[in-house]
Amino acid sequence: MRPGAGSRALAAVMADLADTRDGATYLAERVWGVAQQLALGDGHPLVGRSVPDFVLADGRRTGELLRAGQGALLVFDVESLPCNIMGDAPPHPVCMGSVPDEATGLGAVMVRPDGIVAWACDAGADPTGLAHALQRWFGTAAVR
């Protein structure tokens, strides 16, 4: 296979793109699928995207919570969304009580076992839609 002038020019453009922070981020997101957004309904911009790898107040990372193959409900704003909102129903809430720097303004995030955000709300927002998301993804509507 002999690269022509067009393929050499394209390779040079891609190399220049990869040498920039934004370009490298774009390429990595495309290759790893991080930039994809599944059509899971209207709502918060995080819904349908991979959950960010938050460093939680207790030092754990979001990925560690998902290793057991279960979903997670991360509650950052415990005043708007009480930690006992789901009773004994899965996914069991992880009540942080403080918001990681990367999650400023975020009230709660429900994550599917595959790491995709199924529901989210901002701090101080009404948790409308949580019961529907629980029913859809975890087969329960145990929201009190």
Image (cartoon, rainbow, N blue to C red):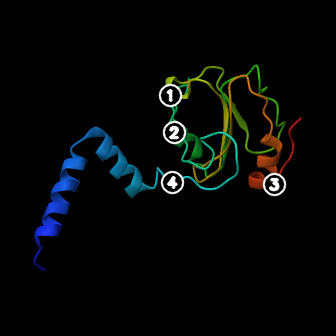
Q: Residue at x 60, y 40 (%)?
A: 45
Whole-percent x, y for residue 132 in the image: 81, 47
Identify the residue position indicated by label 4 in the image: 36
Q: Nearer the viewer, mark 1 or mark 3?
A: 1
Q: Residue at x 51, y 33 (%)?
A: 54
Q: What amino acid type is highlighted by mark number 3? A: Gly
Q: What amino acid type is highlighted by mark number 2? A: Pro
Which mark is first along the chain, 3 or 1? 1
Identify the residue position indicated by label 1 in the image: 102
Whole-percent x, y for residue 23 in the image: 30, 45
**For the residues bearing labels 3 and 2, Cβ distance under 8 angstroms:** no
Measure the alpha-carbon separation of dots 1 and 4.
Answer: 19 Å
Q: What amino acid type is highlighted by mark number 1? A: Glu
Identify the residue position indicated by label 2 in the image: 52
**For the residues bearing labels 1 and 2, Cβ distance under 8 angstroms:** yes
Q: What amino acid type is highlighted by mark number 4? A: Gln
Q: Is residue 93 shown above or below 12?
A: above
In the rendered view of the protein, which quadrant contains the C terminus?
top right
Q: Residue at x 13, y 65 (%)?
A: 8
- Tell me the number on the disc at residue 139: 3
Q: Is residue 40 shown above or below 10?
A: above
Measure the alpha-carbon separation of dots 4 and 3.
Answer: 25 Å
Whole-percent x, y for residue 53 in the image: 49, 38
Which mark is first along the chain, 2 or 1? 2
| SS assignment at label 1 | helix
Q: Nearer the viewer, mark 2 or mark 4?
A: 4
Q: Nearer the viewer, mark 1 or mark 4?
A: 4
**For the residues bearing labels 4 and 3, Cβ distance under 8 angstroms:** no
